[in-house]
Structures are given as C-alpha cells and as structure tokens.
Image (tube, rainbow, N blue to C red):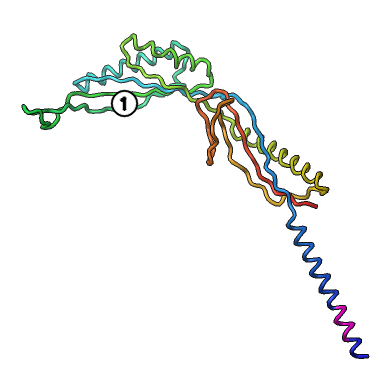
Amino acid sequence: MKPNINALIIGISLILISLIFSGTYKYKFKDAENITVTGLAEKNFTSNLIVWKGDYSRKSPDLKSAYSLLKEDEAAVSAYLKGKGISDSEVLFSSVDITKDYAKTYDAHGIITGSKLEGYSLKQSISVKSTDIDKIEKVSREITELIQKGIEMNSMPPSYYYTNLSALKIDLLAKASADAKSRAETIAKNSGSQLGKIKQATMGVFQITGENDNESYAGGGTLNTTSRNKTASITIRIDYAVE
C-alpha cells in the first residue's frame, strides 16, 4: 500500500511541476509578444521671422581716416534702412573690425626682406531681424543701391526662422503617436489579436527641411534656415503589448 501512495504522491508532484512550468512558459511567451511600430507626422508651415545680414568696408593708409569714412557709411546705411520703413529696434550694427594691411619688401635681387604697414582695412557688419518678411526680403535685394554712393556693401541671403517650434513639436508628437497606434491596431487586428498597453516609446529626431526641397535628414536633426516655406517632421517608435 505504501508504494502505491508514494507513486501517487510522485505523480501528483510531477503534474504540479508540469503545470507550473507550463504556466511560466505561457507567461513568458505572452510577455514576449509585442508589436513595434514607427509613427510619422509631417506639417508644412511658413517662417514668421527673417534675419538679414550684410557688411561694408573701407580702406585707408591712415586709421583715423578709414574709421571716419566707415562711420559715414554707417550713417548712410542707417538712413537708407529708415527710409525703407525699418525701425532702429530691428537693426543691429556690430563693432568695427580692424585689420592691418602689410606689403612685402624686396631687395635688388627680388628676395623678400620683410614687410611694411601699408594701411588699414575696416569692416562693420549689420543685422536686421524682423517679422515683416516681405519688407526685409525686398531690402536685402535692393540695398546694393548703396554702391552708387560709394559704399562697398555686401548683402547676404536672408535666414528664415519660426518662433513657435515648441508648440509645433508637441502637435507633431501627438499626430505621430496617433499614426503609430493606428498602424499597430491594423497589425493586431489582421493577426487576430488585441492591442495592449504601451511598453516603451522612443521619440525620433525632429527635422525641419525646406518645403519640396530634396534635403537629406541628419542623425542629429536638420534645421533649414534658407527656405521661407518649410516642412517639419518627427517619428516615434512604440512597442505595444499584445493581448
């Protein structure tokens, strides 16, 4: 009788162990089941801030004379911008950059013997920042008219920015998350499963490129400043549990 009891106990123990391991396996297998998707959101928008930069320069054998001429140019540039409807608060003049110009000296055999101070080159930069993009674009194209007044004016291409990027980024994240969920639900439905809770979410890189421009994305993010009309995009990778 005792052997039968021992056999029964052993049998029950094996069944219990089998059930425990089976349950553990099923739990681990179920826990390992998930759906990983990447959601994407894009939005076209127009810049609301423009920054235009330029510079002008003067040369003279005498530093004082060169500085005096450069200050006259500054007054002329300032008056020109005011005449175009640009306020003083939108304009920033930089400090004067001074460079000494040297000329090489030679002996009778054409060998360089040294150098001597020939004069001074002075340059000053100007930056205009405004929300009136049309006006500043026009000025950036026309300011070379100052050349007719003897001012060596160089105009740089304008840069375009958007001042509400934080709100734009939040909006895109919400749309990218919704896109990811829609993709995951489609996969789960087609596989006969139900979508569970989010297990992990990883935000991708925020990219701003020129609208309809063939720009490459950068690993650390792209920030286009050359186009007035831009496209913002963001991705989000989400792991969903499957029920």
Give SS at disc 1: loop
Q: Is residue 124 visible?
A: yes
Image coordinates for residue 98, horizontal then vertical, percent: 27, 27
Asked whether residue 9 is drawn in magenta, I would say: yes
Boundaries of the magenta span: 6-12
Q: Is residue 89 visible?
A: no
The quarter of the rendered structure image containing the N terminus is bottom right
- Front one among 132 and 8: 8
230 in relation to 241, above or below: above
Asked whether residue 178 is drawn in magenta, I would say: no
Image coordinates for residue 240, horizontal then vertical, percent: 73, 49
Image coordinates for residue 238, horizontal then vertical, percent: 69, 46
206 in relation to 35, above or below: above
Which residue carries the number 1 mark? 96
Q: Amino acid at mark 1?
A: Val
Determine the residue positioned at 66% across, 37% down.
40
Other residues around mark 1 within 10 Å, as few (<14) / some (14–19) / many (≥20) = some
Determine the residue positioned at 87% across, 82% down.
9
| Secondary structure, magenta segment, majority class | helix
Q: Residue furthest bottom?
A: 2
User: Horizontally, is 212 left or right of 174 in the view?
Assistant: left
Image coordinates for residue 177, horizontal then vertical, percent: 70, 40
- Front one among 15 and 73: 15
Determine the residue positioned at 43% across, 12% down.
142
Determine the residue positioned at 53% across, 16% down.
134
